[in-house]
Image: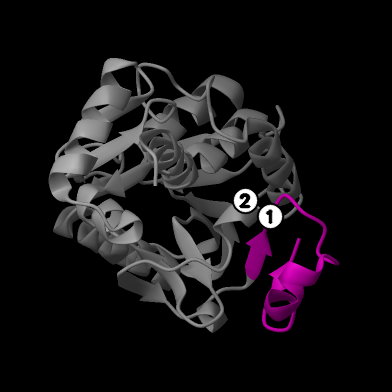
């Protein structure tokens, strides 16, 4: 594979998943760690990505750039609008992190009266800026590069609350493996979030469907909704329609 093709593949993975690990790229591309290291260095030098420990992340998912350069932003805004149809006045909701959830936070209608819990400082700031809802930011250790709080403190807080509906983004999802992730701390927080919710909705662009990660969050039947940017009648969604409410 030529360098340009390799770097295009790397950019695609980063745009889809916000963060990638060098070790995973080595396996997927069948190249050495030195090759991946050089590719990441070159992409970072050209301001296309941000290098982080063990890999790289999208520049769009950063506290300095917000979501103005978000990958597939129109698709994520479409998902956000669908997700908001599930929210009614008086509900207590729990939000994860990620660019699609941030789009949701920006689109909550003025005058909506809900209580939002969130593990993401960035999402909390968007909610405070754009909505009239009560916003409660759960506390814990702020995970480097993911911008959500993790650790025993936030898990203990999640164990003490019960919300009507939880909205989660995901890096990977499939019928066979359910929701997976590549960061152990994130997996533990997502498990606790799902446990604290009466119902759980996954928000994901269709490009992420039928992908898998290394660490299990939950089986697909532990979820209630899947909200994507494509029509539920699309053929690729058929397996999901059989087990979930697909919007």
Do callouts 2 and 1 mark residues in contact (Cβ within 8 Å)? yes
Q: Relative to 18, does residue 96 appear above or below in the rendering? A: below
Q: Position of residue 76 (x, y in %)?
A: 64, 40
**164 to the left or right of 245:** left
Q: Nearer the viewer, residue 64 or 58?
A: 58
Residue occupying the point 59% across, 34% down: 103
Asked whether 52 falls inside the magenta stretch, the response is: no
Q: Is residue 208 left or right of residue 96?
A: right
Q: Residue at x 48, y 42 (%)?
A: 12
Asked if residue 229 lies in the magenta stretch, the reply is yes
Question: From where the camera sits, is residue 175 visible?
Answer: yes
Residue hosting label 1: 228
Mark 2 or mark 1: name the one nearer the start of the chain.
Answer: 2
- Occupied quadrant, residue 202: bottom right
Q: Provide the secondary structure element on which disc 1 rests.
A: loop
Residue 142 visible within the image: no
Q: Is residue 106 left or right of residue 94?
A: right
Q: Which residues are magenta?
A: 225-247
Secondary structure of the residue carrying numbered label 2: loop
Instruction: Please determine whether, in this image, residue 185 is positioned above or below residue 7.
Output: below
Q: Position of residue 120 (x, y in %)?
A: 37, 40
* Residue 37 screen position, x and y as percent: 18, 37
Q: Nearer the viewer, residue 207 or 232?
A: 207
The one of 107 and 171 positioned closer to us in this rendering: 171
Q: Which residue is mark 2?
A: 205
In the picture, measured across the screen, residue 247 lies left or right of residue 7, that is right
């Amino acid at each position: 594979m030529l360098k340009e093709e390799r770097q295009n593949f790397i950019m695609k993975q980063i745009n889809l998943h916000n963060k990638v690990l060098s070790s995973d790229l080595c396996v997927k591309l069948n190249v050495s760690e030195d090759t991946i290291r050089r590719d990441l260095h070159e992409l970072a030098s050209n301001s296309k990505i941000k290098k982080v420990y063990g890999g790289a992340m999208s520049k769009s998912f950063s506290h300095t750039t917000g979501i103005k350069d978000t990958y597939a932003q129109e698709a994520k805004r479409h998902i956000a609008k669908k997700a908001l149809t599930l929210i009614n006045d008086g509900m207590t909701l729990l939000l994860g992190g990620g660019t699609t959830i941030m789009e949701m936070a920006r689109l909550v209608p003025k005058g909506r009266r809900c209580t939002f819990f969130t593990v993401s400082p960035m999402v909390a700031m968007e909610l405070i800026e754009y909505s009239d809802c009560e916003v409660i930011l759960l506390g814990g250790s702020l995970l480097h590069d993911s911008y959500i709080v993790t650790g025993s403190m936030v898990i203990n807080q999640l164990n003490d609350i019960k919300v009507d509906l939880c909205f989660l983004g995901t890096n990977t999802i499939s019928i066979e493996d359910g929701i997976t992730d590549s960061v152990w701390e994130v997996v533990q927080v997502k498990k606790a979030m799902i446990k604290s919710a009466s119902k759980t909705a996954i928000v994901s662009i269709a490009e992420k469907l039928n992908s898998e990660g290394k660490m299990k969050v939950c089986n697909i039947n532990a979820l209630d909704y899947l909200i994507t940017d494509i029509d539920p009648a699309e053929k690729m969604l058929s397996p999901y329609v059989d087990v979930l409410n697909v919007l």
